Image (spheres, rainbow, N blue to C red):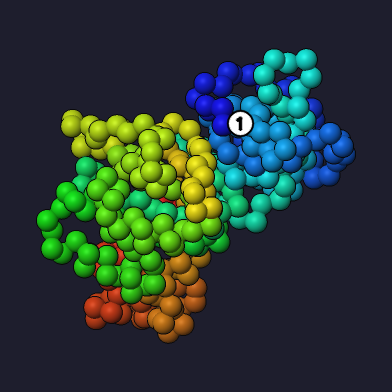
Amino acid sequence: MKDFEKLSDRKKTPSLKFKKRKVTRSLTKTEGFISDIALKGLVCGISGTRILVETESSGCFECTTAGVVITKNENQSIVAVGDVVYILPDKNQSGKTATIIKVEERRNHFSRKEVGYEKEDVIAANIDILIVMLSVKSPKYNKRLLDRFLVTAELNNVEPIICINKIDLSDDINLKSDFDIYKKLKYQTFFISAKELIGMNELKEIINDKTCVLSGPSGSGKSTFINSMMGKSKQFVQETSNKTNKGRHTTSSVKMFKLSNGSRIIDTPGVREFGIWGLEKSELALYFHEFDDFNPKCKYYPCTHTHEPECAVIDALEKGMIDYGRYESYLNLFDSLS
């Protein structure tokens, strides 16, 4: 496969006026003619305006989007890694370049609120599993960030897996018990060392023949995880910043990697914050499943579980039946939603 980082920049095709989109200069329509010479492919990498599409019959193409793209994925990013697309190879061009003319309807996607904007940023499409990568230290795991990932996964119909990396750096005997609440809530949780290959085989079996998106903070070990899973160095690894004790951004694009067991892992840039897109305040409690047994018993409906009298959730919290840290995370999320 052609090295994605060495692909040359190309200018976008001028836009036409159909239905205006906020996320790119290309416009969309829901139906249109597809040429017989169009090739079907899979988006396996995006960096800026550069889009890498792999086809079964003709290999990989560096692509741009057409001025008008056929898609039924309304109000979302036009193209994401994992999308099935149709492309038209460019004529009279050196190298393998093409134009994306159609994006197939997604069965699901993983997205977040774009930083600084009121719009959705689709990170990956057509995925089976979200692997939330956190680390024991450098940087230490943030359970509030984890909860945001878990809510987003369920909101977008993606199965989440919690992966706590760098256990070789910890002697904390209480580490695993700190995640007991997530096991109780039926979230699969793995404690691994991608560098020392601890716990990797079991995780590899879980994601066998699945398409996964890998996300988490910068410095949590996502690139090392990719290298370990593939058995060779595919991603550049960078040490944590000593000054801030936070991860540096090693991955600046979104790329898909194929494993020998048929799995596909979509690697994403590290995050320090994660805004949830498409969730109303009134719906948030439905994604905190420790509330499920108590929601129907609240005196008032709807109940925000923040201040109402005779709230069964708050009563359960005071009796120790709901984890206080998770409830604090709920309040933090509740306040962040508009």
Residue that appears at 13% across and 63% down: 173
Q: Position of residue 153 (x, y in %)?
A: 48, 58
From this viewpoint, is residue 264 visible? yes
Question: Which of 182 and 190 lies nearest the eye of the viewer?
Answer: 190
The residue shown at (72%, 22%) is 13
Q: Please name the residue shown 63% across and 19% down the image.
A: 10
Q: Please state which amino acid type lies under the numbered disc 1.
A: Ile
Give the quarter of the figure containing the N terminus.
Answer: top right
**Up/down of 111 relative to 37, above or below:** below
Mark 1: few/some/many CA within 10 Å (<14, 14-19, 20+) = many
- The answer, for residue 27, to whether it is visible in the render is no
- Left or right: where 206 falls relative to 92: left
The residue to which callout 1 is attached is: 51
Position of 32 with respect to 222 (left or right) is right
Res 68 quadrant in image:
top right
- Residue in front for this viewpoint, 120 or 198: 198
Residue at (18% x, 32% y) in the render:
242
Q: Position of residue 216 (x, y in %)?
A: 37, 47
User: Dot 1 lies on which element?
Assistant: strand
- The x and y percentages for residue 288 are 41, 68
